[in-house]
Image: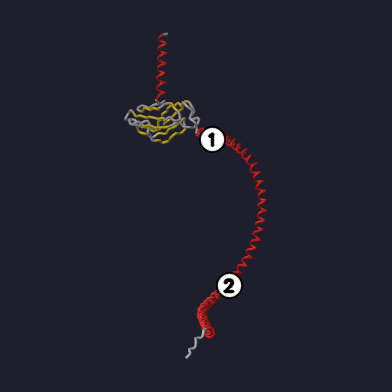
Amino acid sequence: MSKTWKILFLTVLILSLTFVATGQVKAQSQYAGITAEVLPSEGGANTTIILRFLTTNSSVGNVQPADIFWDNNTIALNQAGTVGADDSINYNITVPNESPLSDVGNHTIRVDSTVAPYGAISFFFTFNVTEFIPSPEFLALNDTYYSLLTNYTNILGNYTQLQTNFSDLETNYQTLGDNYTILLDDYNALVSDETTLTANYNYVLNTYGNLTNSYNSLSTNYASLLASFQTLNASYSTLSQDYSLLNSSYTGLLSNYNGLVGQLNFSRNLNYALIVIAIALALIATYYVYFKPKKPTKTR
């Protein structure tokens, strides 16, 4: 019984080691002188998968270039690998974003190449996809979903804003209704004022017509008066000249008059003096004749 348990234990240990070695990085088939690894052996869409080939025997060539397949679907043809620091050849690939190649679970990676001295050989690796890898259609739908979600959020925000605006508009509508009533009353008052203003306008227009007629008549009279004024002005000029001549004549006459008056005064005074002298002489003569006593006559 103890021996049986030992055999079972060794069997389980060997199987476990084989599983661990396979699950970590070892290829399912391997050629002498070439070490083949997949790093890592599991991951998701953002995982960079490195297929590493290292020649451990100088007589064996390396895997360069290679054709790479994922579940028998072509990933790359005649792909040139990158030389690592340890002279290994490395190929970088990612999980295809296409179902069923990206379904969760194990997938087979096959690398075909021509290596001396083996010739055409193939390496098989197992890679475990641990999470869902969306397809381009899914990504497009996902982007569309989030775009629609964003639009819905924006529309919801706009709807809320519209509700607020509607409330404001309703309040404004009621205010406008009140203002409309006030404006209607003002309009009726303005209509009444307009009727009054129309009547006043017609009166003013009639008055303006009368004033225009009066202005035209006055303009005609003004023209006539202006012509008369010009005629009178010409007559005034003539009269001014005549007045100057008359004034000059008057001055001469006044001078002659003053001379004549002087002469007449002199003649009058002289006549008065002569008359007085004559009267005096007459009186003296009368006195001597009638009233002077006679001197006594001397007798001899």
What kind of residue is marked 1? Asn
- Tag shown at residue 276: none
Q: Is residue 297 visible?
A: yes
Q: Quadrant of residue 68?
A: top left
Q: Under tag 1, what secondary structure?
A: helix
Q: Which range of residues does the magenta coloring cover? A: 150-154
Asked if the stretch drawn in magenta spans residue 88, the answer is no
Identify the mark nearer the N-term, 2 or 1. 1
- Tell whether 125 sits left or right of 280: left
Helix, strand or loop status at disc 2: helix
Is any part of residue 252 visible from this angle?
no
In x, y percent, where is residue 199?
Answer: 67, 53
Q: Residue at x 45, y 28 (%)?
A: 44
- Percent coordinates x, y for residue 266 in the rendering: 50, 80
Residue ranking furthest to the front = 300
Q: Gap between marks 2 and 1, in whole Å? A: 96 Å
**Position above or below: 290 against 61:** below
Q: Is residue 239 above or below residue 34?
A: below
Q: Is residue 39 above or below residue 274?
A: above
Q: Percent position (x, y) of residue 245?
A: 53, 78
Q: Residue at x 63, y 39 (%)?
A: 178
Identify the image's colour scheme: rainbow, by chain, secondary structure or one colour.
secondary structure
Pointers 2 and 1 in contact (CB under 8 A)?
no
- Label 2 or label 1, whichever lies nearer to me, is 2
Residue to which mark 1 is pinned: 154
Residue under numbered circle 2: 232
Kindly report the secondary structure that dominates the magenta region of the rendered protein. Answer: helix
The answer to whether 121 appears left or right of 267 in the picture is: left
Q: Quadrant of residue 161?
A: top right
